[in-house]
């Protein structure tokens, strides 16, 4: 569960557990790093077995991260399992980042929406990340420049291969940075494409999730 406005918009996310009665309870509070003011950590949070090894990872969006030369992140972190694991620092509660997905444009709000869904029936979910404020200053449509096309990043084969090779080490350290993508879908001018994402099942009954 994300809480992006906590502590001067640094943001945190909670790990929740569910008991036999189906009641969730707070397990732990986490942050990625302790000094990222306005990063909005936890704006979006989704879980998935993204590397295909059976363990569940968590994708945590940080669309407001504007460090010099960077334009928003989605961090893939280990899903914490106990206070004695290596998934976070005991004192500071810092999550271990296995991979950092990096936006390609300043201000596109990378991570505004995310969804984890198995689109190709291989039993392993892909990760889709929305960036609705993506703009192309060079685009010229009907004689004028348009903004807020929006786009959706689709992370699949390359992302999965690299993620499998990462080794979680320690908090406050990024094992791998990934600024590429497997596929990008771009919207129409002023459409804010990618503002929301959802898995809606096999609507057209072709055997694949939509």
Image: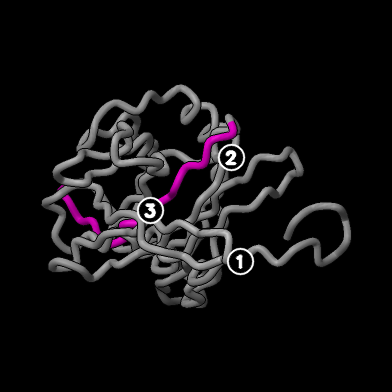
Task: Name the spot of residue 159 as percent of width and height, x first.
Answer: 51, 35
Q: Which segment did they paint magenta?
A: 54-68
Task: Name the spot of residue 78 as percent of width and height, x first.
Answer: 40, 39
Circle 2 crowding by C-alpha within 10 Å: few under 14, some 14–19, many from 20? many
Mark 1 sits on what residue? 198
Q: Quadrant of the C terminus?
A: bottom right
Q: Quadrant of the N terminus?
A: bottom left
- The residue at the point 34 percent across, 59 percent down is 14
The answer to whether 141 is drawn above or below residue 158 in the figure is below
Residue 137 appears in the figure: no
Q: Nearer the viewer, residue 15 or 181?
A: 15
Mark 2 sits on what residue? 156
- The residue at the point 81 percent across, 67 percent down is 203
The answer to whether 158 is drawn above or below residue 38 in the figure is above
**For residue 60, which numbered disc appears in the image?**
3
Residue 118 appears in the figure: yes
Foreground label between 2 and 1: 1
Q: Give the side of residue 48 with respect to residue 110, left or right.
A: right
- The residue at the point 29 percent across, 26 percent down is 169
SS class of the residue under badge 3?
Answer: strand
The Cα atoms of the two marked residues, 3 and 1, are separated by 16 Å
Foreground label between 3 and 2: 3
The answer to whether 162 is drawn above or below residue 118 in the figure is above
> Does label 3 or label 2 sit earlier along the sequence?
3
Residue 61 picture quarter:
bottom left
């Amino acid at each position: 569960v994300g809480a992006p406005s906590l502590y001067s918009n640094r943001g945190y996310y909670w790990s929740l557990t569910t008991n036999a009665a189906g009641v969730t309870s707070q397990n732990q509070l986490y942050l990625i790093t302790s000094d990222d003011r306005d990063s909005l950590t936890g704006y979006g949070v989704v879980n998935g077995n993204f590397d295909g090894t059976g363990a569940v990872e968590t994708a945590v969006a940080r669309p407001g991260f504007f460090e010099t030369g960077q334009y928003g992140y989605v961090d893939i972190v280990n899903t914490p399992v106990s206070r004695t694991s290596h998934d976070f620092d005991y004192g500071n509660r810092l999550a271990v980042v296995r991979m950092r997905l990096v936006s390609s444009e300043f201000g596109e709000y990378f991570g505004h929406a995310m969804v984890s869904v198995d689109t190709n029936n291989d039993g392993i979910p892909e990760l889709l990340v929305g960036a609705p404020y993506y703009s192309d200053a060079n685009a010229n449509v009907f004689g004028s420049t348009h903004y807020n096309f929006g786009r959706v990043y689709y992370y699949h084969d390359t992302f999965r291969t690299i993620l499998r090779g990462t080794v979680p080490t320690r908090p406050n350290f990024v094992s791998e940075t990934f600024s590429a993508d497997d596929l990008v879908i771009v919207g129409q001018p002023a459409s804010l494409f990618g503002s929301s994402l959802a898995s809606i099942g096999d609507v057209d009954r072709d055997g694949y999730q939509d």
